[in-house]
Image: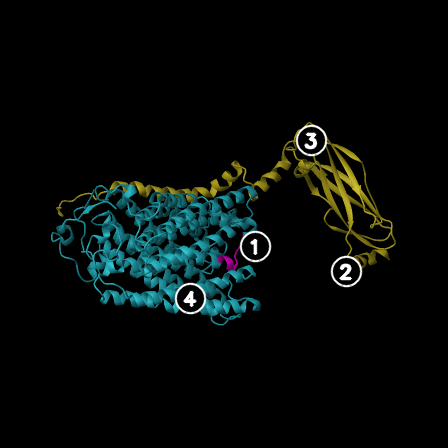
Amino acid sequence: MSTVTVHDHDVQDHHHHAMPSGWRRWLLSTNHKDIGTLYMIFALVMLFTGGFMAMLIRAELFMPGIQLLQPDLYNNMVTNHALIMVFGAVMPAAAGMANWMIPLMIGAPDMALPRLNNLSFWMLAAGGLLLICSILVPFVPGGGTPVNTGWTLYPPLSLQVGMSMDLLIFTVHLLGISSILASINIIVTLFNTRAPGMTLMKMPIFCWAWMVTAFLLILIMPALASGVTMLLFDRHFGTSFFNAAGGGDPVLFQHLFWFFGHPEVYVLLLPSMGIVAHIVPTFSRKPLFGYTSTVGAMISIGAIGMLVWAHHQYTIGMSLAAVTYFMIGTILISIPVGLMILNFIATMWRGAMSFETPMLFAIAIILLFTFAGMTGVMLAVIPGDIQYHDSYFVVAHFHYALIPGALFGLYAGVFYWLPKWTGHMYDEKLGKLFFWLTMIGFNLTFFPQHFLGLAGMPRRIVDYNLVFTEFNMLSSIGAFIFGVSQILLPIIIIKTIRGGQKASARVWEASEGLEWMLPSPPPFHSFSEPPVIK
Amino acid sequence: MDEKQPTRPAGARGALLLALVPLTMFALGFALAPLYSMICEAVGIQSAAAAVAGARELAAAPQDRVVTVRFDTNVPSDLPWEFVADAGRLEVRPGVMQEMKFRVRNRSDRPLVGRAIPSVVPWQAERHFLKTECFCFRDQAIGPGESREMILRFQLAPALPEEIDALTLSYTFLRHDTAAQTAAADATLNPSKE
């Protein structure tokens, strides 16, 4: 990073109006730090809601037979676990970190459009409320059946579900608009409010990761929105977009869904990879190896990722030419992903490494996400996929991709930036305990599911054959360890907010960038006058 | 920085321009409903829609050229059946429906089950040989000494490559009587025997 001048009065900033207090501070907030905090609190609540559903699912699957959940409710839990984790936990947490960190990283006073920022968050909150209504309405007499389609919402089943599906459709609309607005805000911020002298190719890599993510979001969210809108029309206005009886084609929905759904994986992944790309250099005490190629890799992941959606649909009866194209495209993505991972490893090479909690998470991500990449290539190959399709092998694969690839990246970010946000160091011992319990729990949960899938256990079914019992018990025990150990996270966060060793401005020995020039915690208004980057 | 002066935030114009992207994509989602099958057809991605298009080919106008279709019949030695076509060859115009009779006689003294497997030579002609009625791929149970007439209705698709002016349709009757099927054949044939 180049030399940076921060004027003292920017930091202290006495010119602005007094900080609003009480509920008005949060509800009417246009401050990027407060909105970032709101996003992350929302994400944490949703993480535990979705996690509770996962616990119910694993409790039900502890033994064969139906003990705890009726099939419809079980499938509803599977559906909402996915939707809550994707739209409620991971995306808002990543958006929260973007809000907090992007203006600090590029030397901007705030996001470019602060009121839009407020709107984005509160639409998200409204969407979350509607989603909870969608879960609860089947328990009310006359509420109809719960959404039991899985998060893919495929018709014709989704045309037959009760009114909880309508609530879910509106939820998707709200969440979609919220994340489109947030993405537009991030793009505009990155293009217009960078400190003088910070060219695009000097931008911190987390900002680049979010740039690609935001562009992906504005391209793909509308596809999902149009898909569910057509579902709504088919359900209530007598159209036949997907209704085969009226000449519609249910496969069209699958294309729309996966045109959104596949790039969505990269939406979840890229911000976390951006975080890892900050943590690995800091704790290796070396600059990031191959900054330019990492940026290039992220852009190519986004671009190729937009063009390979139908590898989720190999079994729908596409022609050989079409599936071959999707197979080759999918396997091609492993090249930029591999490049990114190799850059991380090359950054560690001969570095003076230390292993604080963020770095432990970063290393675990590199290891476990690569493993998910390998099962990903297996699944990309058509004849293999026909076998693995809709089995627990797929479940194991995408949990290995998304928990390390997205969630652990966010955990790493929390530990990395928590001292900056709160002004206090977190408890390193608790952090490491949290890391190891999480690792043991996670791997014990999902590793056996590979074997279950290869042995033929189908996903999204409440019961299973007796031969799968042992691995399922193992997986459930792992899930309980995983689930219970997550309680440490809010404990650590609250403990850090309330006190602890005072954090310096730079926090870490080798952290680089504008955000580390400000005191910890940064003042309510920062960089009112842009820093000069020479 | 003066707070009171109302200024347009930097990038408001950019934000409006960017908003066009999701709006376009949303509209494109709806446009896909009709475009989807049109694109598949235009770029030749075969799908269910293409199969319907193939069926439509049947209704296409007959052509003037004449193609020789030869019929070949085979029975392996473990099936004591006689199997012949009414004619060894037929001059066929693509696009015109044709009919050919085949006769089978069971020369043995017990009921037997056979199954006819077709094959077309040259293989390039196979997908243009459209059978609308065929006795193949189905178990045919025939009583002792019984003889039966079987009908094949077909036409050659107009898309049959120009260079193919003769082709052969070969049928082979394979014995297909598991113990259970022989019993079933007995049961169905017994009433007719009396």
Magenta stretch holds residue A390: yes
| Residue type at tag 3 | Ile
Q: Which residue is mark 2?
A: B180
Disc 2 vs disc 1: which is toward the camera?
1
Number of marks present in the image shown: 4
Q: Residues within 10 Å of mark 2 (few under 14, many from 20)?
A: few
Q: Residues within 10 Å of mark 4 (few under 14, many from 20)?
A: many
Magenta stretch prevailing secondary structure: helix
Q: Which mark is residue B164?
A: 3
Disc 2 and disc 1 on one polypeptide chain: no
How far separated are the C-alphas under marks 4 and 2?
55 Å
Most distant residue in the bottom direction: A67
Q: Is residue A187 left or right of residue B152?
A: left
Is residue A144 visible to the viewer in this orientation of the structure? no
Residue at the spot 22% in from the left edge and 48% down from the top edge:
A107
Which lettered chain is shown in cyan? A
Residue B59, placed above or below residue A31? above
Q: Secondary structure at mark 4?
A: helix
Give the image location of residue B19, x and y in percent: 32, 43
Instruction: Give the labeled residue for mark 4.
Output: A441
Task: Give the colour scheme of this rendering.
Answer: by chain
The percent position of residue A74, horizontal first and vertical second, equals 47, 65
Comparing A436 with A63, the one in front is A436
Looking at the image, which residue is at 48% across and 64% down? Answer: A72
What subunit carries mark 4?
A
Figure quadrant of the C terminus of chain A: top left
Amino acid type at image mark 1: Gln
* Residue B86 in view in this figure: yes
* Amino acid under disc 4: Gly
Q: CA distance from mark 3 to mark 2?
A: 44 Å
